């Protein structure tokens, strides 16, 4: 059984990973959209932006969290998922961060 400090560290580490992954996605959303194969105009209309506003936000990397969620919902496909997972794995290896077994996560979250 792990003590409370270890559990807090694991949760802290996981939250930091999620934030880091989000920042990486936000920074690379243009590339992710291109990988998806969808045209900018199509994605723009699907998320409720004009193509010109979408283009400006894409070039400035200034999409809001809600817009990024909508974009991912529109462009989600196997190519995008593979690209994102590969980039996350590359980042983890480059940072040489420690990893934790799934059992630790399950214990912290109270899952069986």
Image: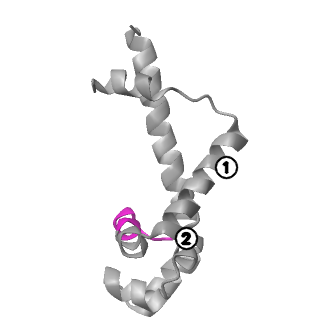
Spot occupied by residue 42 in the image (x, y as percentages of width and height): 41, 89
**Residue 30 circle label:** none
User: Callout 1: 10 Å neighbours few (<14), some, many (20+)?
Assistant: few
Spot occupied by residue 38 in the image (x, y as percentages of width and height): 48, 84
Residue drawn at x 52%, y 50% is 21
Horizontal side, residue 95 vs residue 50: left or right: right
Query: Compared with residue 63, is residue 49 higher up or lower down, i.e. above or below?
Result: below
Horizontal side, residue 97 vs residue 52: left or right: right
Query: Label 1: which residue?
Result: 90
Element at badge 1? helix
In the image, 79 versus 16, the foreground residue is: 79
Residue drawn at x 44%, y 29% is 102
Q: Tell me, yes or no, whether the highlighted magenta stretch contains residue 20.
A: no
Quadrant placement of the C terminus: top left
Spot occupied by residue 106 in the image (x, y as percentages of width and height): 35, 26
Query: Compared with residue 13, is residue 58 higher up or lower down, i.e. above or below?
Result: below
User: Callout 2: 10 Å neighbours few (<14), some, many (20+)?
Assistant: many
Q: Tell me, yes or no, whether the highlighted magenta stretch contains residue 63.
A: yes
Prevailing secondary structure of the magenta residues: helix
Spot occupied by residue 8 in the image (x, y as percentages of width and height): 41, 21
Quadrant placement of the N terminus: top left
Q: State the image quarter where residue 92 is shown.
A: top right
Q: State the image quarter where residue 74 is shown.
A: bottom left
Horizontal side, residue 13 vs residue 48: left or right: right
Instruction: Tell me how far mark 2 sits from mark 1, CA to CA.
Output: 15 Å
Please state the extent of the stretch shown in magenta in the rendering: 62-69
Query: Label 2: which residue?
Result: 32
């Amino acid at each position: 059984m792990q003590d409370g400090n270890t559990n807090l560290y694991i949760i802290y580490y996981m939250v930091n990973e999620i934030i880091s992954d989000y920042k990486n996605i936000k920074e690379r959303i243009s590339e992710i959209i291109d990988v998806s194969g969808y045209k900018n105009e199509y994605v723009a209309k699907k998320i409720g932006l004009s193509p010109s506003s979408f283009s400006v936000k894409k070039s400035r990397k200034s999409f809001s969290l809600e817009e990024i969620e909508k974009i991912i919902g529109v462009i989600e496909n196997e190519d995008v998922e593979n690209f994102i997972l590969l980039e996350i794995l590359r980042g983890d290896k480059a940072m040489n961060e420690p990893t934790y077994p799934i059992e630790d996560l399950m214990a912290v979250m109270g899952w069986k």
